[in-house]
Amino acid sequence: MLNFFGLIVVLSGLWLGLSGHYQPLIMWLGGLSVLLSAFLAVRLETLDRESAPFFGLPGILTYWVWLMIEIVKANWIVIKACLRAELDINPALVKVKTSCESDLARTTFANSITLTPGTVSVTLEGDKILVHALYEEEAQPEVFAEMDRRSKRAVDSRVTA
Amino acid sequence: MIGAAALALVVAIVLMLVRALSGPTLYDRVLAVNSIGTKIVLLLGVLGFLMDRPDFLDISLLYALINFVATVAVLKFFRYRSFQVPLRRRTGGRR
Amino acid sequence: MSATVSFLLDIKPVLGAFLCLAGAILAVVGTVGVLRFPDFYTRLHAASVTDTSALTLAILGMALMSPSWLVVFKLAAIWAFFFLTGPTSSHAVANAAHTAGLQPLIGAQARSGRGGRDHDGE
């Protein structure tokens, strides 16, 4: 129920931000469309604790900030690799084990790996992720350990609590 | 300077079109088309600012949504040769 | 004090246009990477430069140029949407290629300039 009202609040905020017209008639139509979307989400049964993560938003935001810094660092490496006259790439397939429990935390971890340029998660089976990396030396298990720990702390403790 | 940005984006799109046309595998083409979609979203926004009509951003938001769905739909079709397959995971998990 | 504020207001659109240009140039760099790299999986890495840094820089630049907060909100919506779906579609393409049996080039193999091995999925 809390998730349902959270969804309505988020959808209303999105509508108000995107519309820019605040006459009464338009507002009514907007409210109707928000209710229709929420009703469809309930009918699709996609509204559970993991698909509507309104809990612990601060933790997710701090994780996001840390991830942005990592993305900038990784971007620099890949840009240099793109522009170097001689290709010196050393691609490799690496298996990474995650300690995340819930689906949402695993998705966060795998998506973070994909989002940082230079590493892409290829398959995800159970708690093992197959990662393709542009440089083998950039993809040692200890590199991913911190990301794994942080995504577990940001998401997992809130989902299972 | 915004015009130069738009021009650079057009150059990037044309170069990516080369990869989309010549890509040796299907996945290279899908990747190139997806990437062209990202660049077109940026180009629409930049064009909106170039013509002083930031309303173009609505179109680029819509394009971003369609781009994602189209990529997943094309991949799904070439994997199962049909759209009528549920994408729910079959093995393991709690569902 | 007010001189500083007016200076910042003056330089804001210029800075925005400069960031837009930087983002567009990064998009070209990513595309050059996609054209140069030897096989599909390495091209994926080059394309993700466009998806992250070029997008972020260009959207930051547009936000600095924007006339109202409504436009900033729309830009933020586009940015957040791309950061949620971009890795999903990258992973979808990589996973589909892996499932279809496309083998990546490993290590020094990738530098010798041979193209990726063909597969029978097409």
Image (cartoon, coloured by chain):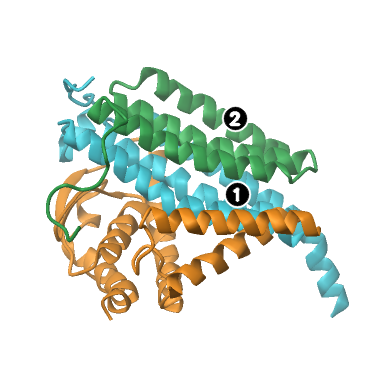
Chain colours: A orange, B green, C cyan
Under mark 2, the amino acid is Val
Q: Quadrant of the C terminus of chain C?
A: top left
- From the viewer's perspective, is residue B25 above or below residue A61? above
Residue B92 drawn at (x, y percent): 12, 55
Say whether residue C104 is visible.
no
- Nearer the observer, C111 or C35: C35
Q: Which of the 4 image quadrants contains residue B57?
A: top right
What is the number of the mark on residue A36? none
What is the number of the mark on residue B10? 2
A45 displayed left or right of B42: left
Say whether residue A77 is visible.
yes
- Nearer the observer, A145 or C29: A145
**What residue is drawn where x is 32% and y is 62%?**
A108
Residue A27 drawn at (x, y percent): 73, 59
Q: Identify residue for label 1.
A: C58
The secondary structure type at the circle numbered 2 is helix
Q: Residues within 10 Å of mark 2 (few under 14, many from 20)?
A: some
